[in-house]
Protein backbone atom coordinates (compact mmCIF):
# COMPACT_ATOMS: atom_id res chain seq x y z
CA UNK A 1 0.00 0.00 0.00
CA UNK A 2 1.17 3.52 -0.72
CA UNK A 3 2.07 6.33 1.62
CA UNK A 4 -0.98 8.57 1.70
CA UNK A 5 -3.95 6.92 3.33
CA UNK A 6 -6.97 8.89 4.50
CA UNK A 7 -5.29 10.10 7.70
CA UNK A 8 -2.36 11.68 5.85
CA UNK A 9 -4.65 13.08 3.17
CA UNK A 10 -7.28 14.65 5.42
CA UNK A 11 -5.59 15.05 8.83
CA UNK A 12 -1.81 15.39 8.46
CA UNK A 13 -1.51 17.42 11.69
CA UNK A 14 -3.64 15.12 13.88
CA UNK A 15 -2.07 14.11 17.19
CA UNK A 16 -4.40 11.16 17.91
CA UNK A 17 -2.44 8.28 19.46
CA UNK A 18 -3.96 5.72 17.11
CA UNK A 19 -4.26 7.52 13.80
CA UNK A 20 -2.46 10.84 14.07
CA UNK A 21 0.38 11.24 11.59
CA UNK A 22 1.80 14.03 13.78
CA UNK A 23 2.05 11.95 16.99
CA UNK A 24 5.66 10.76 17.13
CA UNK A 25 4.79 8.18 19.82
CA UNK A 26 1.52 7.00 18.26
CA UNK A 27 0.55 4.05 16.09
CA UNK A 28 0.20 6.24 12.97
CA UNK A 29 -2.24 3.92 11.23
CA UNK A 30 -2.62 4.42 7.50
CA UNK A 31 -6.08 3.44 6.26
CA UNK A 32 -6.87 3.02 2.55
CA UNK A 33 -10.08 2.80 0.63
CA UNK A 34 -11.21 -0.61 -0.53
CA UNK A 35 -14.54 -1.51 -2.07
CA UNK A 36 -17.19 -0.79 0.54
CA UNK A 37 -14.86 0.40 3.31
CA UNK A 38 -11.29 0.82 4.49
CA UNK A 39 -8.30 -1.44 5.07
CA UNK A 40 -5.06 -0.94 6.95
CA UNK A 41 -1.92 -2.95 7.45
CA UNK A 42 0.03 -2.64 10.68
CA UNK A 43 3.24 -4.31 11.79
CA UNK A 44 3.32 -4.54 15.60
CA UNK A 45 6.58 -3.64 17.31
CA UNK A 46 8.08 -5.20 20.44
CA UNK A 47 6.77 -2.37 22.66
CA UNK A 48 3.18 -3.27 21.61
CA UNK A 49 3.38 -6.62 23.46
CA UNK A 50 1.18 -7.78 26.32
CA UNK A 51 3.41 -10.79 26.87
CA UNK A 52 6.23 -12.22 24.74
CA UNK A 53 5.19 -12.43 21.10
CA UNK A 54 1.59 -11.26 21.54
CA UNK A 55 -0.01 -7.85 20.93
CA UNK A 56 -1.57 -5.97 23.85
CA UNK A 57 -5.39 -5.88 23.77
CA UNK A 58 -5.43 -2.11 24.21
CA UNK A 59 -3.35 -1.70 21.06
CA UNK A 60 -5.78 -3.98 19.20
CA UNK A 61 -8.69 -1.92 20.49
CA UNK A 62 -7.04 1.32 19.40
CA UNK A 63 -6.39 -0.03 15.90
CA UNK A 64 -10.03 -1.08 15.52
CA UNK A 65 -11.39 2.12 17.10
CA UNK A 66 -9.44 4.60 14.99
CA UNK A 67 -9.81 2.61 11.78
CA UNK A 68 -13.57 2.29 12.35
CA UNK A 69 -13.86 6.00 13.06
CA UNK A 70 -12.18 6.83 9.77
CA UNK A 71 -14.39 4.38 7.89
CA UNK A 72 -17.40 6.21 9.32
CA UNK A 73 -16.02 9.64 8.42
CA UNK A 74 -15.32 8.56 4.85
CA UNK A 75 -18.77 6.98 4.54
CA UNK A 76 -20.42 10.23 5.68
CA UNK A 77 -18.26 12.23 3.28
CA UNK A 78 -19.26 9.99 0.38
CA UNK A 79 -22.94 9.80 1.34
CA UNK A 80 -23.23 13.58 1.66
CA UNK A 81 -21.01 14.48 -1.30
CA UNK A 82 -18.58 16.48 0.86
CA UNK A 83 -15.07 17.57 -0.15
CA UNK A 84 -13.59 16.38 3.14
CA UNK A 85 -14.73 14.04 5.89
CA UNK A 86 -16.67 15.45 8.84
CA UNK A 87 -15.12 15.27 12.30
CA UNK A 88 -16.33 12.05 13.86
CA UNK A 89 -15.88 10.55 17.31
CA UNK A 90 -16.47 7.14 18.81
CA UNK A 91 -19.81 6.79 20.59
CA UNK A 92 -19.46 3.07 21.34
CA UNK A 93 -17.26 0.23 20.22
CA UNK A 94 -16.88 -3.40 21.09
CA UNK A 95 -13.89 -5.65 20.54
CA UNK A 96 -13.92 -9.43 20.62
CA UNK A 97 -10.44 -10.88 21.06
CA UNK A 98 -10.79 -14.19 19.25
CA UNK A 99 -7.25 -15.52 19.68
CA UNK A 100 -3.83 -14.15 20.70
CA UNK A 101 -2.51 -11.72 18.09
CA UNK A 102 1.15 -12.33 17.21
CA UNK A 103 3.66 -9.48 17.08
CA UNK A 104 5.71 -11.08 14.30
CA UNK A 105 2.94 -10.92 11.68
CA UNK A 106 1.51 -8.12 9.57
CA UNK A 107 -1.98 -7.28 10.84
CA UNK A 108 -4.70 -6.50 8.30
CA UNK A 109 -7.74 -4.64 9.58
CA UNK A 110 -10.91 -4.05 7.57
CA UNK A 111 -13.77 -1.70 8.38
CA UNK A 112 -17.12 -1.80 6.60
CA UNK A 113 -19.93 0.65 7.30
CA UNK A 114 -23.18 -1.28 7.72
CA UNK A 115 -25.57 1.62 8.34
CA UNK A 116 -25.01 5.26 7.36
CA UNK A 117 -27.42 7.78 8.91
CA UNK A 118 -27.40 11.61 8.80
CA UNK A 119 -24.74 12.07 11.48
CA UNK A 120 -23.70 8.57 12.53
CA UNK A 121 -22.40 5.33 11.10
CA UNK A 122 -22.37 1.74 12.34
CA UNK A 123 -19.16 -0.08 11.34
CA UNK A 124 -18.08 -3.74 11.43
CA UNK A 125 -14.38 -4.48 12.00
CA UNK A 126 -12.06 -7.44 11.58
CA UNK A 127 -8.34 -8.01 12.29
CA UNK A 128 -6.44 -10.85 10.61
CA UNK A 129 -2.89 -12.10 11.19
CA UNK A 130 -1.31 -14.96 9.24
CA UNK A 131 -4.66 -15.79 7.66
CA UNK A 132 -6.47 -16.14 11.00
CA UNK A 133 -9.09 -13.81 12.48
CA UNK A 134 -7.62 -12.53 15.74
CA UNK A 135 -10.21 -9.88 16.62
CA UNK A 136 -13.57 -8.60 15.46
CA UNK A 137 -15.55 -5.60 16.53
CA UNK A 138 -18.23 -3.09 15.82
CA UNK A 139 -18.79 0.54 16.61
CA UNK A 140 -21.01 3.56 16.35
CA UNK A 141 -19.24 6.71 15.24
CA UNK A 142 -20.88 10.15 15.29
CA UNK A 143 -20.16 13.42 13.47
CA UNK A 144 -19.68 16.28 15.93
CA UNK A 145 -20.65 19.89 15.56
CA UNK A 146 -18.96 23.17 16.42
CA UNK A 147 -18.47 23.48 20.16
CA UNK A 148 -17.41 19.85 20.62
CA UNK A 149 -13.73 19.51 21.67
CA UNK A 150 -12.99 17.31 18.64
CA UNK A 151 -14.56 19.68 16.09
CA UNK A 152 -12.00 20.47 13.36
CA UNK A 153 -9.32 18.45 15.11
CA UNK A 154 -8.26 17.01 11.76
CA UNK A 155 -7.47 20.31 10.08
Image: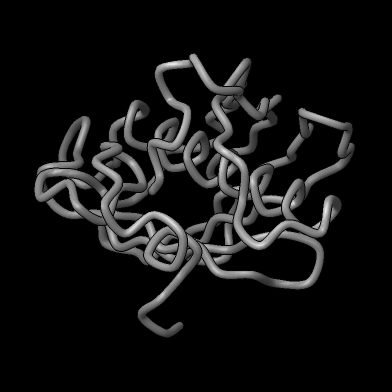
Residue at image coords 26%, 61%: 104
* In the image: residue 15, left or right of residue 64: left
Q: Quadrant of residue 15?
A: top left
x, y percent for residue 127: 55, 50
Q: Quadrant of residue 88?
A: top right
Question: Going by the picture, which residue comes out furthest to the front?
Answer: 146
Q: Considering depth in this image, is 124 or 104 the residue closer to the camera? A: 124
Q: Considering depth in this image, is 97 or 2 the residue closer to the camera? A: 2
Q: Is residue 131 above or below residue 143?
A: below
Q: Considering depth in this image, is 78 or 109 the residue closer to the camera? A: 78
x, y percent for residue 122: 78, 32
Question: Going by the picture, which residue comes out furthest to the bottom?
Answer: 2
Q: Quadrant of residue 90?
A: top right
Residue at image coords 79%, 45%: 113
Residue at image coords 61%, 51%: 85
* In the image: residue 33, left or right of residue 104: right
Residue at image coords 44%, 31%: 61
Q: How is the image coloured?
A: one colour
x, y percent for residue 8: 37, 65
x, y percent for residue 62: 40, 34
Q: Is residue 67 above or below residue 31?
A: above
* In the image: residue 129, left or right of residue 8: right
**Across the whole image, how many numbered discs are drawn on residues?**
0
If the image is split into quadrants, where does the N terminus sit? bottom left
* In the image: residue 146, left or right of residue 120: left
Amino acid sequence: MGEDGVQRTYAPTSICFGCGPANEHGLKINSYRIEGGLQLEFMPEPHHQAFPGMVNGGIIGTLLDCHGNWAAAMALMDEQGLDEPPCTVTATYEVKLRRPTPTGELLTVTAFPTEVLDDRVHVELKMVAAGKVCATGSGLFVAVKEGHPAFHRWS
